[in-house]
Image (spheres, rainbow, N blue to C red):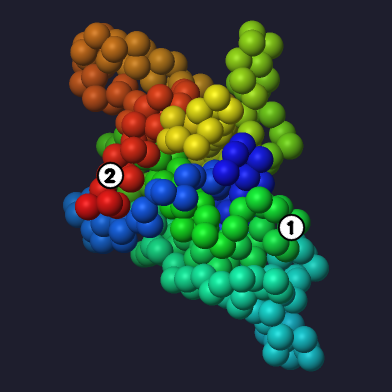
Amino acid sequence: MGNRASREANAAGDIAGSPVAAAPPSVPPPRPLPAECPVPAEFRARAYKNPAVYNVYNERINDPSAQQQQQQQQQRPLAGLAGQDVLDPKNNMPLDPNQQPCAGQRKLLSTDRQASNIPKGGTESTWVYPSPQMFFNALRRKGKGDDVSEEDMEAVVFNHNTMNELTWREVARWESLHYNECGAATLLRFRGRPDDLSPLARLSSWFGGPLPFDRHDWWVDRCGEEVRYVIDFYFDDDKAGSPEAFGLRVRPAIDSPTAALDRAKMWVYENFAQYGLPCPVTGHPPSVGSRGGGSSGSGSAAAAAAQQQQASSG
């Protein structure tokens, strides 16, 4: 599969509006992610829990008014067809996740969904990734992925899940700057914005840098404070078909003086970490500035993805 499949698969993500990139069919299906709780033990008993819970469409699902509308909707004649590609007029998405084979499908796909390691805001659980069948249905429903076959879906879903895990790893690195005030940050909600260039991506392109193939905004719940992160996803056509083709940039949006200060701090940490030096101001160790998930380019993201693939192959 080429770059076209990678970009088209991006439109099908059911978690974090996340980047979906087609991988070589030779990539083995992943093993289940580690089952350990993503929240540190010392914070588990007293962790803040946001009163709001959101779905994958950035809609609050435990709002009293929304629950009343849902009850009224269930009383309508079409309610019995939920899960059969009946669309919700509010977002043009299925009323329920569609796990049924779509028209023209040549073989059955797995309907198993994998739990992520990304803590879900307002709950004590984590976000759940879409199944290969849900992914395939989303591609077909949106008229995407003409060159993505049923045989490709395990690899497509693998890349989708891996990129989300890498993104959360980078978010957690930024959140470590606030560990003393909140050691249990969670992902509250998210939104895909593929048609909106971020200021950093636009500025980078003016100086000859590549344009991202997608952008997402993630809202992190920092123990009661909502913090928006901007994520740009990149694809290198020359490296299509390999993990090195994908890259991401993760950083807090400059919506507050605190976010601007965090960016300045991380710039210092990262530059001193290159030489194994602690921060000259705070004395924080260089590990804070080490890019574990590829925040600015494809190199480290590719390395982390390769580690994921090696782990999945035993």
Number of disc labels = 2
Q: What element carries label 2?
A: helix
Residue shown at the point (32%, 17%) measured from the top left: 269
Residue 166 location (% of width, % of height) = 40, 40
Q: Residues within 10 Å of mark 2 (few under 14, many from 20)?
A: few
Task: Name above or below for residue 225 compared with residue 93.
Answer: above
Compare residues 195 and 219 and report the one nearer the observer.
Answer: 195
Residue wearing tag 2? 310
Q: Which amino acid does label 2 sit on?
A: Gln
Report, in whole angstroms, how far the alpha carbon at label 2 lies from the one at label 1. Answer: 32 Å
Is residue 143 visible to the viewer in this orientation of the structure?
yes
Residue wearing tag 1? 142
Residue 149 location (% of width, % of height) = 60, 58
Q: Is mark 1 on a helix, strand or loop?
A: loop
Q: Residues within 10 Å of mark 1 (few under 14, many from 20)?
A: few
Task: Name above or below for residue 205 compared with residue 76.
Answer: above
